[in-house]
Image (cartoon, rainbow, N blue to C red):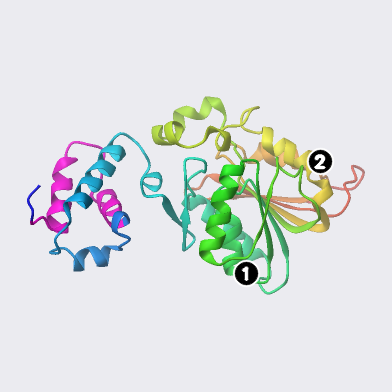
Amino acid sequence: MNSVFTYFKAQQWAFSYVKNKDVTNEEIDRILCGLKGWNTTDLLINYQTEMPENEFEEFKALLDRFIQGEPIAYLLGFQSFYGLNLNVSSDTLIPRPETEELVDWILEDNDINQGLSVLDIGTGTGAIGLALKQNSANWNVMLSDISDKALRVAKQNAKNLGLKVETVQSDLTQNIDGKFDIIVSNPPYIAEDERKYMDESAINFEPHLALFAENNGLALYERIATEISKNLKNNTVIYLEIGFKQGNAVKKIFQKEFPKAKITVKKDFYDNDRMVRIKYRGEKDANDENIY
């Protein structure tokens, strides 16, 4: 490398280096900016600044790993979600834009000024629960996950963001005491036969514990439906992220357990079924007329 190598030249070298690779200029800029903690404006301002050789070598190494399929979020160790900068690791899923729509739905539905109690099951990085807490300071939020390693990431994110939340290691609701106004979960929901729809990077790098579920991806919804009663108030609302082919199946699971519930399936911005809301209405009573 030339001793006088600017960030602009590093960028242009990278554009040429990945030619004929499945890499965009925007992805290169994201890696370069992420390495420096910059936004795109910072990069433009520093175009003619000399780049230290050790930084260039690190940039090249990250680029090589990306070319091999490793997600940018894992390369850099963080991901933006709902305006929050969240640490991620190989023990957590990478938060996705579709899940931001679930946060939108919850915030639109509920009074952010009330002291509501919220449980985020399978929290991973803490993305959903922390986004809710950030936008609803009066809500009391509990983050839970079966993975102690994932929960440590969520705790660190809460600390970094200055958000006071409770954390509990739990297999779904097994270790969860108390009742909640809002329960939300983005559980593993991918069926084994849906691998063909997935990016190779997700299959190769993201934790399978947080991706795949048995019974055509429905096993965790079935468990939530049968195990959650002890944590429900008479007007608890449950919000779930689902797979794009699971709307009717998940609705039926909760209809069976809670015949009095009002259940809504909502599409995402790709027009795929992506979210389910279950408005619980007191103790289930199979003799009552269903309300949908």
* Residue 136's disc number: 1
User: What SS does tag 1 mark?
Assistant: loop
Q: Please state if 229 lies on the left or on the right of 164 as rendered.
A: right
Q: Quadrant of residue 119?
A: bottom right
Q: Quadrant of residue 21?
A: top left
Name the magenta segment's main secondary structure. helix
- Amino acid on which the number 2 mark rests in the picture: Glu
Q: Please state if 42 lies on the left or on the right of 255 as rendered.
A: left
First to last magenta residue range:
4-33
Can residue 235 be spotted in the picture?
yes
Q: Nearer the viewer, residue 259 or 74?
A: 74
Residue 218, percent from left and from top: 66, 33
Q: Quadrant of residue 69?
A: top left
Q: CA distance from mark 2 to mark 1?
A: 30 Å
Most extreme residue toward the right is: 287
Q: Which residue is mark 2?
A: 257
Most extreme residue toward the top is: 193
User: What residue is rendered at 57% in x and 53% in y?
Assistant: 154
Residue 85, percent from left and from top: 45, 59
210, above or below 157, in the image: above
Q: Please state if 27 lies on the left or on the right of 148 as rendered.
A: left
Task: Please tell me whether mark 2 or mark 1 is closer to you in this view.
Answer: 1
Mark 2 or mark 1, earlier in chain: 1
Mark 2 Cα shell of 10 Å, populated few (<14), some (14-19), many (≥20)? some
Q: Please state if 77 lies on the left or on the right of 4 as rendered.
A: right
- Amino acid on which the number 1 mark rests in the picture: Ser
Can residue 260 be spotted in the picture?
no
Residue 89, percent from left and from top: 47, 45
Q: Is residue 16 located in the magenta-colored stretch of the structure?
A: yes
Residue 104, percent from left and from top: 57, 61
Q: Is residue 42 located in the magenta-colored stretch of the structure?
A: no
